Amino acid sequence: MGWGDIDHDTARKSVANSVYSVCLRDGDRLVGLARIVGDGALYFYLADVILLQELRGGGHGVALMSAVLSYLAKAAKPGATVAVLPLKGRESFYQRFGFRCCPDDFLGPGLYLPDPRRRHEQV
């Protein structure tokens, strides 16, 4: 559904270690997933909102985000940071729910580590 070429055990472990996850199913078939990673109090990263291509535009992503936002309303403490790094071109989906582009008055531009397995000795 968009995670690329990963094995079943890696996917299971990733979802199990999330602080929150919600799934959409069609019978036994997984058709959508949203999950948050973080510390469960001050830092939350919306790691995935994934939906089968043929279901996009039908309100299913909105349903996933509604569940995510409901969880955050209960779990996020005052001053919490909630972040997402959307795929290019998907920013407007998250903006509909109140997410803002970085940099803004509070956060700088997002960064990522392209190869975390590579040993970095330039510190």
Image: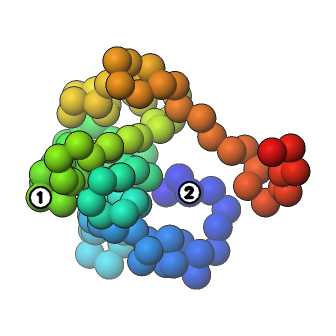
Q: Amino acid at mark 1?
A: Lys
x then y, percent, for residue 86 = 46, 36
Q: CA distance from mark 2 to mark 1?
A: 28 Å
Judged from the image, the secondary structure of the residue bearing numbered disc 1 is helix
Left or right: where does residue 116 sit relative to residue 9? right
x then y, percent, for residue 28 = 32, 78
Q: Residue furthest bottom?
A: 9
Q: Looking at the figure, which quarter contains the C terminus? A: top right
Q: Which residue is mark 2?
A: 3
x then y, percent, for residue 33 = 35, 60
- The residue positioned 68% from the left and 44% from the top of the image is 113
Question: Crowding at label 2, few (<14), some or many (≥20) Cα neighbours within 10 Å?
Answer: few
Left or right: where does residue 54 sit relative to residue 20? right
x then y, percent, for residue 14 = 50, 71
Q: Are marks 2 and 1 in contact (CB under 8 Å)?
A: no
Residue 84 visible in the picture: yes
Q: Amino acid at mark 2?
A: Trp
Judged from the image, the secondary structure of the residue bearing numbered disc 2 is loop
- The residue positioned 64% from the left and 67% from the top of the image is 6
- The residue positioned 51% from the left and 78% from the top of the image is 13
Left or right: where does residue 91 sit relative to residue 64? right
Q: Give whichever of 55, 43 is nearer the camera.
A: 43
Q: Which residue is mark 1?
A: 74
Residue 50 visible in the picture: no
Question: Crowding at label 1, few (<14), some or many (≥20) Cα neighbours within 10 Å?
Answer: few
